[in-house]
Amino acid sequence: MDALLIHGGSPLDGEVRISGAKNAALPILTASLLAAEPLKLANVPHLKDISTVLALLGHMGVRVTLDDKNHVTLCGESIPNKEAPYEMVKTMRAAILVLGPTLARFGEARVSLPGGCAIGSRPVDLHIKGLQAMGAEISIEHGYIHAKCKRLQGARIVMDMVTVTGTENLMMAAALAEGATVLENAAREPEVVDLARCLIAMGAKIEGAGSDIITIHGVDALHGAEYSVMADRIETGTFLVAAAMTGGRVRATHAQPDTLDAVMSKLGEAGAKVSVGPDWIEVESDGRLKSVDVRTAPHPAFPTDMQAQFMAMNTIAEGAASVTETIFENRFMHVQELRRLGANIEVSGHTALVRGVPRLDGAIVMATDLRASACLVLAGLVAAGETTIERIYHLDRGYERIEEKLTQMGARIRRVH
Ligand code: EPZ
């Protein structure tokens, strides 16, 4: 099993090119199931989760071709297999995103129920409820979601909770339904907007993406399109926090500043200097930061996927701050690992109280989920001495070549097998 070895203490300095967004690419790839013509995508990141979903789509019958310029072309002309098997779904719960498109185009789909996940139970009941509201007959048998319908009918659906992939699944299903669908209490995340833009390029009629009411007028068929995936705002935020913590200066290029307002204002509050261009964000800091309170909530509020990274920043900032996680019920597994590095954190319920300490000391720690792994990398970059992070396969799911990108900016980090 791979591990990362980090010698802390070097300020980061330089530029980093941001990759395409994992959480936009995943639903956009499954949108290929909606059309019989090719969908040609640019800026798809090279990540484990991406290859998993490409393998699943290939298994279903999508013709997937990759060219040397990072373009992925997917053709959903014939989909003989309408099933997403357990072996593929258990490693990546976002596979649930094949349910809406497959059901909408073919009137049937069988998708393994995603299992639990480290950060929470993460049910998909709202995905199922929405499809049933559109006329789907759905049963759960032997761990599989069996769905069928003649043709989905447009419906007004009020989502009980804000769900990102739930909104995405239903938006894709509604694209080919008969009549209009209104999704109320829809997720407003930029990745939902990116998917909507891609669907519109394929001929879908969608209004209101990015707001909490999305209206989709169903059409009989979608056609092929060319589309470029948005920049990954969480990768961007992770590197900007690294710059602030290490007392360096980092410019994230090929980024999308308008997707990071909450994160940038928190970095400013912590005392980092944030400057912005059309497609870049730069953070400079002398490493002396003030603790900042953080409370996660659906976009445009502070993103849950940046919670662990800001907790790492608070461990060495001046003062005490609270970090409250409102989206997932168990997204504090990085706390124990940060304590091994010398952090002073007390957890009560969904809130962690972080008291800044003068410094962290390197140790062996273990990654438990994707963003917790990123937070441990950040802590390792500032901890005195050597930090070893084990089980970094979690990291490879969401960060493309992170050690190369950090090394280019002066970090002392390497992967060991
Ligand atoms: C997406 O997960 C992201 N993944 C997550 O990123 C992100 O943390 C999350 O949205 C929140 O922003 C992808 O986009 C592939 P939700 P998703 O449905 O859609 C509850 C990362 O690190 N819920 O918005 O699965 C759920 O349990 C990953 O890149 C239901 O109860 O999250 C959670 O408490 C981690 N029933 C809350 O809603 C449902 O049917 C929000 O979940 C659906 C969700």
Image (cartoon, grey):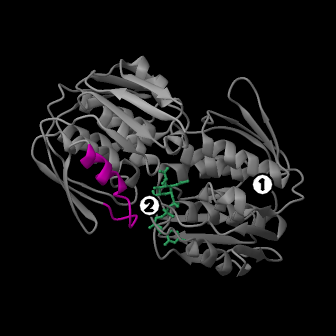
Q: Earlier in the sequence, mark 2 or mark 1?
A: 1
Which residue: 64% across, 60% down? Answer: 90
The residue that disc 2 covers is 119
Q: Residues within 10 Å of mark 1 (few under 14, many from 20)?
A: many
13, above or below 391, in the image: above
Give the x, y percent position of residue 272: 21, 32
Residue 334 is covered by the magenta coloring: yes
Image depth: mark 2 or mark 1 in front: 2
Q: Quadrant of the N terminus?
A: top right
Disc on res. 33: 1
Task: Out of 83 and 88, give the one closest to the viewer.
Answer: 88
Q: Quadrant of the C terminus?
A: top right
Judged left or right of residue 17, residue 31 is right
Kind of element beneath mark 2: loop
Which residue: 73% across, 76% down? Answer: 153
Residue 390 is covered by the magenta coloring: no
- Amino acid of disc 2: Ile
Label 2 lies in ligand 1 vicinity (Cβ under 8 Å): yes
Q: Which residues are magenta?
A: 325-340
Give the x, y percent position of residue 100: 70, 65
Task: Out of 149 and 5, give the one closest to the viewer.
Answer: 5
266, above or below 187, in the image: above
Give the x, y percent position of residue 129: 61, 78
372, above or below 417, in the image: below
Which residue: 40% across, 24% down? Answer: 413
